[in-house]
Image (spheres, rainbow, N blue to C red):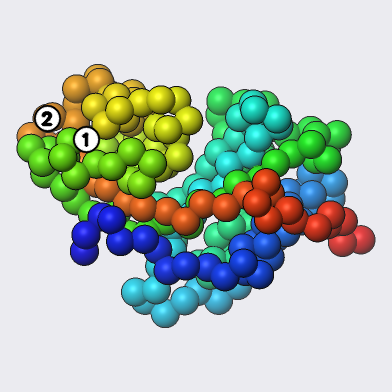
Amino acid sequence: MKPDLAPALIAREERERLLAVARRAIAEYLLENRTPEPVPSHPPGLRHGAFVTLHIGTRLRGCIGRLDSPDPLETLVAVCAVLAASRDPRFPPVDPRELDTLEIEISILAPPELVPAAGILSRLEIGVHGVVVSLGASRGLLLPQVAPEHGWNALRLLEETCRKAGLPAQAWRDPEARVELFTAQVFSDAEFPARPVKAAG
């Protein structure tokens, strides 16, 4: 598989519904201490990856996801939304009073492709590819939208992904390192405003 292949496109109505799912899951967790209920998994081979990113204005408020999961996409988005609001170690948990100002962004990931370090700089396209760097027990991931938001070039993106993993900036050059590229379909409240969702009660 080539890393420039995008994940299967999700229709507008489904994108809006997934944003509403994420918002409802966060509201139910914060207001009622309810967590998303598990549902039957997809058959083997049908796997998704997804990240949910939370902002308040221009300020990052949380971001957590999974590179792949056997869970149905709706369940995966709901779980990641709750974790982003409550378990991102970089931030305190979202306060219920922040719900009205919370902006949600969802990234649906295509399967990553392993790329040799020798050719990574010529393959990596800023704004298109996200990066995963793994070495030993350490792994870091940065989404495709992160580099253009910070004005990074391809080299800087690789270095920052290494730092995200807690590794030296040049660890991606290590012969034992595993460097993968992936693409993502990204959508947010800004493009597809989710209708206000009240927690069930």
Residue positioned 80% across, 58% down in the render: 195
Residue positioned 74% across, 39% down in the render: 102
First in sequence: mark 2 vs mark 1 = 1
Q: Gap in Å between the C-alphas at discs 2 and 1?
A: 8 Å
| Label 2 close to label 1 by CB (< 8 Å) | yes
Q: Which residue is mark 2?
A: 174
Q: Which residue is mark 1?
A: 135
The answer to whether residue 34 shows anywhere in this view is: no
Toward the viewer: 33 or 88? 88
Q: Amino acid at mark 2?
A: Asp
- What x and y, as percent, mark residue 166? 33, 24
Q: Is residue 133 above or below residue 7?
A: above
- What x and y, as percent, mark residue 143? 42, 41
Toward the viewer: 8 or 134? 8
Toward the viewer: 103 or 135? 103
Q: Residues within 10 Å of mark 2 (few under 14, many from 20)?
A: few
- What x and y, as percent, mark residue 84? 61, 41
The answer to whether residue 18 shows anywhere in this view is: yes
Q: Quadrant of residue 86?
A: top right
Q: Is residue 188 above or below residue 55?
A: below
Kind of element beneath mark 1:
strand
